[in-house]
Amino acid sequence: MPKRKPTKADTSAETIAGELAGAGASNAPAQVLSVMGSGNTRTKVTRTLRDVRIRVDFVSTLGEAHRALDEHEYDVLLIDLDHTGADANEMIRGIAGSGRAVRCIVTCRHPDLGVAVSAMRSGASDLIAMPINKTELQERIVAAVEQAGRLRRQARRVERLKRLCRRLQAAQESISEQVDVLYDDLPLVKAEDEVAPPRPKQTVAGEYGKMIRRELDVESLLRTSLEYLLTKTGPTNAAIFLPTGHDDYSLGAYVNYDMPKDTVDVLLDHLADVVPARFEEEASIVRLRSDREIAAALGEGLGWLSGTEMTVFTCVSNGETLAVAALFRDASKPFSTDLDDMLDTLRSLFAEQLERVINIHNRHIPKSEWPGAEDENEGGYWGGMAA
């Protein structure tokens, strides 16, 4: 029997499946839970998603869906509004508020504006008008699966950081006492501080160094550093991005000066995707003084930064980039070039203390029990963690 030639649909399915695998999905197939009536629609959905290595479980009621979600981990919940009615929105709202890493997609044969608004307000990530062609359905389900994967990875990173902070907090008091004893044994250094007229760079090193030498908690170190930074720069938006250990960065801490409060998290997450990737290997302090320079450095899609000036710098210790920081505010209030010496001193001290926070504590713990040891081949100092 002659071999069947692959069709365009086959090729598209293979491409989409490859993208899903390349996005960091595990070997296990992605899982979708679908609430819809029986019949041909179920069969079509099953065949369509099977081609991109996605498994589908079907239930007939929202109650059954609740029980299935409690018993198994799904990536996507696919709900047919024509089958369930508006009660589905209440269920989606509950899932969105629970913090579960499951994306909700609703389908409807004749969606109108009211249906779309209700679905989006409840927390649905997508609305699909049925019927839909095979390739588009595959693409939209795969996109939701990838979003769910990113949410799970982020949750794991946050949990690892929380464990690290708890361990560091337990050691903070004893280490602080040791540091005080060491400092008290350096009379020549203190005498020089009292006699020599301080230069600006020395002043920053002394002030900031004294503030952070007791900070053995990551969150406190970030907060103290941003507070001190603002005393030197004046009002500004500021963000510090930390490596996750998965070849990307996430937001560690920020100061919101004039960004829209309701969208600040989304905007800064966007910056976390583009700023560190562009500047993590940059040794100098970089100034982006116009929309054109920002677009050239970071790419398009940052229209919300229009009319701003940005300063970006890395924080490096022992050749390892431990953080990337970005300061930005209205271009009518540009950053003074006199700040460069201060920023250079501050970023060096910050990186040293950030490394010390990890190393001082971890030297008292067997390496196999270090936080993030499961990612020791991936994350440098952080072992895959970010604030």
Image (cartoon, helix red, strand yellow):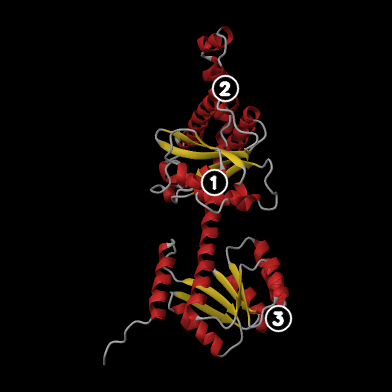
Rate crowding at label 1 as few (under 14), some (14 to 19) or many (20 or more) other CA atoms within 10 Å.
Answer: many
Image quarter for residue 129?
Answer: bottom right
* Residue at the outermost left position: 1
Can you say whether 179 is above or below 322 in the image? Answer: above
Q: Amino acid at mark 3?
A: Gly
Identify the residue position indicated by label 1 in the image. Answer: 161
- Residue 107 at x, y = what percent? 62, 78
Is residue 213 visible in the rendered image? The answer is no
Question: Residue 108's x, y, as percent?
Answer: 64, 80
Q: Secondary structure at mark 1?
A: helix
Q: Where's the C terminus, which quadrant?
A: top right
Which sits in the foreground, 231 or 299? 299
Question: Quick check: 231 above or below 117?
Answer: above
Which comes before the other along the chain, label 3 or label 1?
A: 3
Q: Amino acid at mark 2?
A: Val
**Badge 2 or badge 3: first in the primary sequence:** 3
In the picture of the structure, the residue carrying the numbered disc 2 is 204
Task: Please give the name of the residue rendered at 64% of the width and 74% of the height, measured from the top-left corner.
Answer: 66
Type of the residue with mark 1: Leu
Q: Furthest residue to the bottom?
A: 1
Q: Nearer the viewer, residue 257 or 124?
A: 257
Q: For this rendering, which residue is in front, 240 or 161?
A: 240
Name the N-terminal-most of marks 1 and 2.
Answer: 1
Dot 3 alpha-carbon crowd within 10 angstroms: few under 14, some 14 to 19, many 20 or more = few
| Residue 162, percent from left and from top | 57, 46
Which residue is identified by label 3? 85
